[in-house]
Image (cartoon, rainbow, N blue to C red):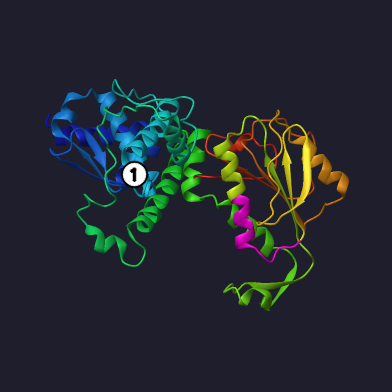
């Protein structure tokens, strides 16, 4: 059997045994390319070195095929942006190989990159954690299998891009593929999708908003009338609608416990300043610092922001207890908590909407008992 036939048989085998990945295989173009050391993808095309394909067992070939399909479907080529290609490739491999190990019966070839501590995080989070570790990383298994988006596509970037750009066109393409694959897998009763894989799929088909967008979504659902531009801001070149009607209260807690590093705390404070720049028309915003105790409230002012206080253990209870006792309840008060998520939660669910803002490596989204979770990727 030559390499081309072996690839074709692998796709048929995957379609029969694991319908979810079989559908993804139908959405990708597969080619042999002797210039590729092992296997790779540009987000649309999956490429195999002929000798490498012939050297693999059936199970290992199927595993590598699924590995590349997941890279493509989860948009690992186009999501890289300006990040370091090598570190990004290692981060993406950790995530993809974790999915294969937990969701399939396939065995990856020896030397595959694993890290059970990181594989459940977003690729952007894993990338940031790897950078902070500042240790040597080895990704010799596939030799860097994430190519520039669209670089190997026979259809060319002109056809794929037009106004949207290759990244946007590819995202729409794989969103459709993931939706069809999920529907078929659930309907067939074979290749059942686990909760972990479902989360990755949801991140593509229903991507999370960044936390500042979630804040704006809260603001626009408040029962107010928009009465032209806010005249106080026009002189600063900010043409923002004037909010009239019921007042909006925002309470922001910043985790200053010992588990939050200085770099993460600086990131938190930068995000808080971002609120002031994006929403200078907010009134009634208050800042708190919290470890096992609560400090504040302080006026939320960019020029005179209170320096962080704390460095003890972590408990979220004091902040939410304070808001309950203060009577700041109802739909016009928003509670924002910037934290790594590792601490004790209150036993009650706050009446106010809650938005958790979590840095790379923080508590898993599904582990938060209430509220919405937005994950920072910086």
In the rendered image, residue 27, in percent from the top left (x then y), is placed at: 31, 48
Circle 1 crowding by C-alpha within 10 Å: few under 14, some 14–19, many from 20? many
Q: Residue at x 46, y 45 (%)?
A: 183
Q: Which residues are magenta?
A: 271-283
Side of 21 relative to 263 (left or right): left
Residue 274 magenta-drawn? Answer: yes
Specify the quadrant of the image occupied by residue 59: top left
Q: Nearer the viewer, residue 15 or 317?
A: 317
In the rendered image, residue 13, in percent from the top left (x then y), is placed at: 29, 32
Q: Which residue is mark 1?
A: 72
Q: Nearer the viewer, residue 121 or 106?
A: 121
In the rendered image, residue 18, in percent from the top left (x then y), is placed at: 38, 33
**Residue 15 appears in the picture as rendered:** no
Residue 43's place in the image compared with 165, above or below, is: above
**Residue 337 appears in the picture as rendered:** yes
Q: Residue at x 42, y 35 (%)?
A: 131
Q: How many marks?
A: 1
In the rendered image, residue 121, in percent from the top left (x then y), is placed at: 49, 35
Specify the quadrant of the image occupied by residue 114: top left
Specify the quadrant of the image occupied by residue 278: bottom right
Residue 37's place in the image compared with 334, above or below, is: above
Residue 37 magenta-drawn? Answer: no
Side of 243 relative to 176 (left or right): right
Side of 254 relative to 206 (left or right): right
């Amino acid at each position: 059997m030559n390499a081309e036939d072996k690839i074709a048989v692998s796709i048929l085998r995957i379609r029969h045994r694991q319908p979810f990945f079989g559908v993804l295989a139908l959405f990708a173009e597969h080619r042999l390319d002797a210039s590729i050391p092992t296997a790779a993808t540009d987000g649309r095309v999956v490429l195999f070195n002929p000798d490498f394909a012939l050297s693999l067992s059936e199970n290992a070939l199927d595993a590598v095929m699924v590995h590349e399909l997941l890279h493509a479907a989860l948009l690992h080529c186009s999501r890289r942006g300006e990040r370091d290609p090598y570190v990004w490739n290692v981060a993406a491999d950790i995530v993809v190989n974790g999915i294969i190990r937990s969701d399939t019966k396939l065995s990856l070839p020896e030397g595959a990159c694993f890290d059970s501590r990181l594989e459940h995080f977003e690729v952007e989070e894993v990338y940031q954690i790897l950078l902070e570790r500042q240790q040597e990383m080895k990704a010799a298994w596939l030799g860097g299998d994430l190519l520039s988006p669209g670089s190997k596509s026979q259809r060319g970037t002109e056809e794929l891009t037009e106004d949207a750009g290759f990244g946007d066109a590819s995202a729409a393409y794989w969103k459709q593929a993931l939706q069809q694959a999920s529907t078929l897998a659930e309907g067939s009763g074979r290749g059942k999708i686990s909760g972990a894989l479902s989360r990755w799929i949801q991140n593509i088909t229903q991507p999370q908003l960044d936390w500042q967008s979630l804040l704006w979504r809260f603001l626009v659902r408040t029962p107010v009338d928009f009465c032209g531009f806010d005249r106080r801001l026009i002189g600063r070149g900010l043409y923002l609608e004037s909010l009239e009607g019921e007042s909006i209260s925002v309470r922001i807690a910043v985790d200053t416990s010992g588990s939050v590093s200085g770099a993460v705390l600086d990131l938190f404070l930068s995000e808080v300043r971002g609120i002031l720049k994006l929403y200078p028309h907010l009134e009634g915003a208050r800042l708190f610092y919290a470890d096992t105790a609560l400090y504040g409230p302080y006026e939320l002012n960019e020029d005179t922001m209170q320096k962080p206080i704390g460095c003890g253990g972590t408990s979220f209870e004091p902040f939410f207890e304070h808001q309950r006792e203060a009577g700041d309840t109802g739909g016009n008060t928003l509670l924002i908590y910037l934290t790594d998520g590792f601490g004790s939660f209150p036993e009650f669910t706050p009446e106010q909407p809650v938005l958790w803002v979590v840095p790379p490596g923080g508590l898993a989204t599904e582990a938060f008992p209430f509220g919405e979770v937005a994950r920072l990727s910086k």
